[in-house]
Image (tube, rainbow, N blue to C red):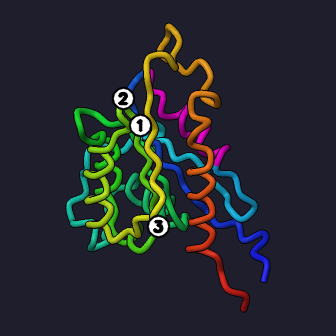
Amino acid sequence: MPTENLSIRIGIILGSNRPGRICRTIGEWVRQTMQHDNLTIDLIDLEEINLPFLDEPELPAVHNYQKEHTKRWSKQISSYAGFVLLLPQYNWGYPAVLKNALDYLYDEWAGKPVSIMCYGAHGGFQAALGIKLVTQGLNMYNMATNPSFDIGKEMFDAQGQFQDIDTAFARYRKSLQAVSSEFVNLLKKEPE
């Protein structure tokens, strides 16, 4: 049976809020490259979400949210079937803004597939390892395809932005298309 018009919703969470960041540019490129007939892919920008440091009085697993920003975050995350976590590597780790956003919720993440995409001078391998432990703790399904992006000074202009991201990241296209296919294969709905 064809799976057309499934409209599986996938969220790409931009895991950096640093001024002058390249995360949004990479996220837009990832979104465009992952386009698939059966997926609706949105960017979820943590800079725009702007969650304070975790300020809920009860554990997220209790699901007794008191703060309006947490209720909005819960509703937003609940609307997605799967996620891409896109993050830079900072000092061999992941950004605090991403960990904070993940820590706000619990059940909303459980069982949902996640592809971890890190970038850095050496692809962000250590950050990917660290955040994978967090996603496992949240009972997310860690997907098989988790591209990491090597970045180098030659890719950037004087303002620290990509000169031509499509050329710089061309070698990652097939991996991103594999992520899309994996989402579809994991989440396709059987005909009723």
- Few, some or many residues within 10 Å of mark 2 (<14, 14–19, 20+): few
From the image, tell me which residue sits under label 2.
121
> For the point 23% across and 38% down, which residue is it?
92
From the image, tell me which residue sits under label 3.
113
Q: Is residue 163 magenta?
A: no
From the image, tell me which residue sits under label 1.
119
Kind of element beneath mark 2: loop
- Few, some or many residues within 10 Å of mark 3 (<14, 14–19, 20+): many
> For the point 63% across and 63% down, which residue is it?
181
Cα distance between the residues tagged 3 and 1: 20 Å
The image quadrant where one finds the N terminus is bottom right
Amino acid at circle 3 = Pro
- Taking depth in this image into account, of 75 and 18 the one nearest to the observer is 18
| Sequence-wise first label, 3 or 1 | 3
Q: Main secondary structure of the magenta part?
A: helix
Amino acid at circle 2 = Ala
Location of residue 20 by image quarter: top left
Q: Which residues are magenta?
A: 20-33
Kind of element beneath mark 3: strand
> For the point 33% across and 71% down, which residue is it?
139
